Image (cartoon, rainbow, N blue to C red):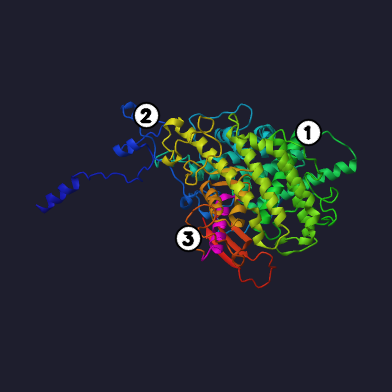
Amino acid sequence: MTDSGDKEKETKPLKSRRASRPKVKTGCNNCKNRRVKCDETRPQCIKCVRSGRHCDGYPAYKRTVEVAVPIAPRPDGIPSTAIAPSYPASYAITPAVSKIVARKPRRPLEQSRPTPPPTPIVRFSPTTYAPTVLPFDAQEGQYFQVFRTHTASELSGFFDSEFWTRSVLQESHSEASIRHAVVALGALYKTLEKSSESPPSSPDSNSVDTAPNHYNFALQQYGKALARLREALQNNETRSQRTILISVVLFTCFESFTGNHTSAISQIQHGLGLLEERRQQSRQQMVVKQKEIVEDELVQMFTRLAIQAKSYDMAFHFPPPYVIRLTPAANPGSPQSPTSPSDAASTTSVESAIPDMFRTSQEARASLDSLCERIMQFQEGLSSYYQGPNNILPQSLKASGLGFRTQLAQWAAAFEPLLESRRRPKMTNTERAGIDVLKMMQLMTSILFLMGFSTSEMDFDNHMPQFKEIIDLAKEVVVDEELMLAQSKCGSPTSCRHRQPHNNGLHFSGLTGYQPGMYRDEDDYTHIKASFALDLGIVPPLFVVATKCRDRKLRRDAIKLLLNSPRREGMWDSILSGRVGQWIMEIEEEGMGEYLGYGMGTMDGAVVPQDRRVMVKEILFNMQSREATLRCGTRGARDGDYDLRTNETHITW
């Protein structure tokens, strides 16, 4: 009896168990309530339409300070041990010999990991890009298409740039190193898109189209780009300086995108050296050559990269050898003429006159770039003679820089008509944002230049109107971007279900009822996706407000904008910048009581006292592992002096 019972149990088929999968949190509200899989078609899902139901739309994807998405140099699917590219060593162009030489490998955070296996072909679009001229396989062709249609315009930031949309694409037809670098940047764009998409992909989506796969392929292509240029130079194949400089820009872009700021700074410094070498050769030959358009583009590109690297160094206080120099170290000039063209290794050393009125934002941008670079050269030249604490110059030298203060005021006056024109109905979001960003950069430059002669943090209070204007302009940029993205996602602005009730009928840019700058303090950033651009934008000015403005409302606005609109602008990362501002604020406002958000400042009019104010002394960080050590202290205190306000913390994000 027992035997037959056991036999019966053995022959009885086992009941199959339902596979355990993560619950899908995406999909429209109807499908979620009905517990069916949604096809996630927008603005209305096909399942609702076919069944005759009204699609209630999709739940808002909110991003708050606590859940801000970092710009992913390394997707979550890749361990921190795999952050190194899949090639033996990094390479940089040495300006003296125009040759690729190996740099010392970076010290790994953990034990090194073998090179990941080749990534399978990624089918992230229904159609396959099959180029007829470029020697691509199907996978490389897809990423090249991504770069051509999306990445090139994203890298330009808030400004149109033919360098990315024309010059780089043209050069990729004939140069293998540039071609592979372009494909690598396209793969990085897909990495960022998959890492921060809103709403996230469903768990059963194409397993090949993932951020780790895109990222691994980007590393492989970047390794090929470095190897191809190295081989070409070692084999004495003809390579124009233009080709090498374009390669340097692409390599700088890749290193910045992946969070390797030390390599990015090295690439920028080498590019500046190549430009200076070319300038010196043309002077020795006494031959005036007609400039090519692409050369002008490259000069402007390296001017902006130099400004970016120098601003990064001034804010984060890097140790040698990662301190960018705009003037030759052997001959930094004299205190009497620190920005002399003969003494400065500058990309725009000759001072240009500021017109009475700028006709285009491109003209205003070129003028501001030249002015900012000359100001930085001036400060760098004087700092080499007067070793003040934290590179603060003596007050007695302030008169020597009054000419720059006048030029900044002249630039602001010439820019005013363009600034007012941004509210015209036909102005696009990109054009308006570019104008806003230029004004923010001018305001930031004016504040930092004047404060470069002050040892008191209290003097920053004199610039409160400028801080407020920076915040207002940044809100215009972010709100316009949010509304534009909401429109593209929802299809119809009138049926957009991501608008918050407190927006009181706020419409999209270009439609009736909307005016640029219509921002409410309680507005949410529900559609902001993570982004990367090589050019500077809103992050550096907001960082200055977050760390130097003691108005409690303005400071919190700056931190909120940095953390809730994740972006990396060159080497400037909004999440890291926001976290630094948050830490400085907590230190300075300790004991002041909770801020309740009523108007400007606090309820009782309290301000941060002088003995509580600190400045950033040093930030040592690793963007690839998303960790940093922050140090602060008293403004004007020299290294080695006893400082009661010295503080240090370690953060991760």
Mark 1 / mark 2, whichever is N-terminal: 2
**Residue 156 versus residue 579 in the image, above or below:** above
Residue at the far left: name it.
Answer: 1
**Residue with the mark numbered 2:** 46
Check contact, mark 1 vs mark 3: CB within 8 A.
no
Does 560 sit above or below residue 641?
Answer: above
Tell me which numbered mark, 3 or 2, is placed earlier along the sequence. Answer: 2
Name the element at disc 1: loop
Report whether 9 appears left or right of 370: left
Q: Which mark is residue 142?
A: none
Q: Is residue 153 magenta?
A: no
Q: How many marks?
A: 3
Residue at mark 1:
292
Report the span colored magenta. 572-591
Q: Please tell me whether the stretch drawn in magenta is mainly helix, strand or loop.
A: helix
* Distance from the alpha carbon under mark 1 to that under mark 2: 53 Å
- Please name the amino acid that badge 1 sits on: Glu
Circles 1 and 2: CB distance less than 8 Å? no
At a point 60% along the width and 35% down the height, the residue shown is: 430
Residue at 35% in and 37% down: 29
Precedes in sequence: disc 1 or disc 3 = 1
Q: Residues within 10 Å of mark 2 (few under 14, many from 20)?
A: some
Camera-side residue of 6 and 340: 340
Kind of residue sitting beneath label 3: Glu
Residue 186 in the image: state x and y as whole percent: 58, 38
Residue nearest the observer in this picture, 559 or 129: 559
Whether residue 257 is visible: no
Q: Check disc 2 and report its element: helix, strand or loop.
A: helix
